[in-house]
Amino acid sequence: MTRPLDHGRTTTTPARGPAPPPHAVVIGAGFGGLAAAIRLAARGYRVTVLDRLDAPGGRAYVHRIDGYTFDAGPTIVTAPFLFEELWTLCGKRMADHVELRAMDPFYRIRFDDGSIFDTNGDAEFMRREVARLSPEDVEGYERLLEASGDRYGFGFEELGNTPFSSFAAMAKALPKLAGFRSDRSVHKMVSSYLKDPRLRIALGFHPLFIGGNPLTITSMYTLISSLERKWGVHFAMGGTGALVNGLVDLVEGQGSTIRCGVTVEEIIVENGTAKGVRLASGEVIRAHLVVSNADVAHTYGRMIDPSLRRRWTDRKIEKTAWSMGVFVWYFGTNRRFDDVKHHTIVLGPRYEGLLEDIFQNHYLPSDFSLYLHRPTATDPSLAPDGCDAFYALSPVPNLRSGTDWAATAESYRAAIEERLEQTVMPGLKKAVTVSHMTHPLDFKDRLLAHEGSAFGPEPLLFQSAWWRTHNKSEEVKNLFFVGAGTHPGAGLPGVLASARILEKEMPHAEVFR
């Protein structure tokens, strides 16, 4: 295009090119952050993911020690379609990049008296298992299945896809929540259908997978067992880290950037709007919006000026009930323990009393129940030939217990080793060749988890849905949350669903062009 100049000459004005895509910064490269990055890029954003660890994964970090591969955190995939959606957004097929294996049984549960109970998705098999332990409970079991299925349909498929940025959405859901007796706990609901105390545990322990106490968590969370029956329980060959690597490939394939080993110190807020982040190094990264996959208490309590916070004040953070911690012993053996299933629950002598000590009394008891993970039952490549890789997870109180984990960790590990040797792994002590531990203090220092909690706010009724951290911040414009601490909650399905909800809450990229 030409235009005359005052002195009579003409010049050419360069045509403007297309506006660059708006920039989104994602804090944290856990499953929530990676899923958010994929969905943001698919919507037209240029994305930078920042993580303080030396590799992506967050709670799904991978430890590699002397030829053994240990998934640090989540090991159970129960809603694979949520992962498949992310590959589809990138025009790819998940099956071409990650192999999922269906588990059978889902879990083997060993009671303290030595009896066992296997679970899977086959209806007739489950009826036989229930009848084997308690014939009089078969009818009650059938009714429990129907009740939990109803809660799955409403709680997961409907509420789990609903943003709760305003109370109007919550008010709309309240009548149905009341009809489902959401004020009752999972344990009370399960106990109303079943008489055998072993079955009450076996069919009601699932909330522990998302940081909830079965004795107090709303009965809506009986939906977890229905989720497993509907979609199955799966394991990613190569470990959960294979899923992390697959998502990283998707993120980078979209042209987005992942930077590890950098710590976000502050979310920059100008005129009430998130405008980027400041790193601990002093570097400033400007952005049109910010998504935090970091711990919600740390994000609000350490990254945002207190004067900008009205709801999530320091007092609110301290009054929140935070989920329990976990103690995890990762160990490798120089032989295989082929009698141990991929997922085994080794129950201790107490159930209700143990849960009360952990969640209400904030006391570390000497007894425990364990989730024993043996990935080499499915994928022998995760250990040297003829060897096994394990982790044993024990729910423990968060740091409000005052436990000195630096002094306690080794004796606690030794007690777990003794318990496993006496129950499901005779000869264990002589077979252990690799050992590593993590506990609530590590969650606090390494993952910046408030009180060392493993799952963010405890998923109580009044800390769920609208009462949980909103996916769209009510404090700062263009600040969003994904991950375990926000709606719909912890666990891989909840974390991935939070990124799906983000799509409904975030502004379209065109707004910033």
Image (cartoon, rainbow, N blue to C red):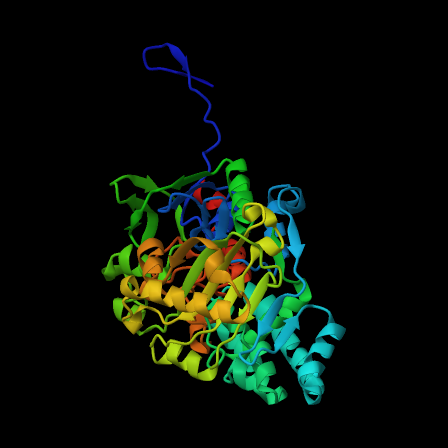
Residue 166 visible to the viewer: no
Given residues 254 and 188, the one toward you in this image is 188
Given residues 217 and 508, the one toward you in this image is 217
429 vs 271, left or right, is: right
* Residue shown at 50% from the left, 71% from the top: 422
* Residue shown at 39% from the left, 58% from the top: 437
Counting every numbered tag in the picture gives 0
242 vs 361, left or right, is: right
Q: How far across and how far down the image is residue 285, in percent?
A: 33, 40
102 vs 382, left or right, is: right
Q: How far across and how far down the image is residue 508, in percent?
A: 50, 48
345 vs 327, left or right, is: right
Q: How far across and how far down the image is residue 126, in percent?
A: 71, 75
Given residues 160 and 84, the one toward you in this image is 84
Given residues 208 and 145, the one toward you in this image is 208
The part of the image, by quadrant, that contains residue 110 is bottom right
Q: Is residue 458 above or below residue 294?
A: below
As drawn, the residue found furthest toward the right would be 124
Residue 464 visible to the viewer: yes
Q: How far across and how far down the image is residue 493, in percent?
A: 55, 61
* Residue shown at 51% from the left, 63% from the top: 427
User: Quarter of the image containing the C terminus?
Assistant: top left
Q: Is residue 312 above or below residue 509?
A: below
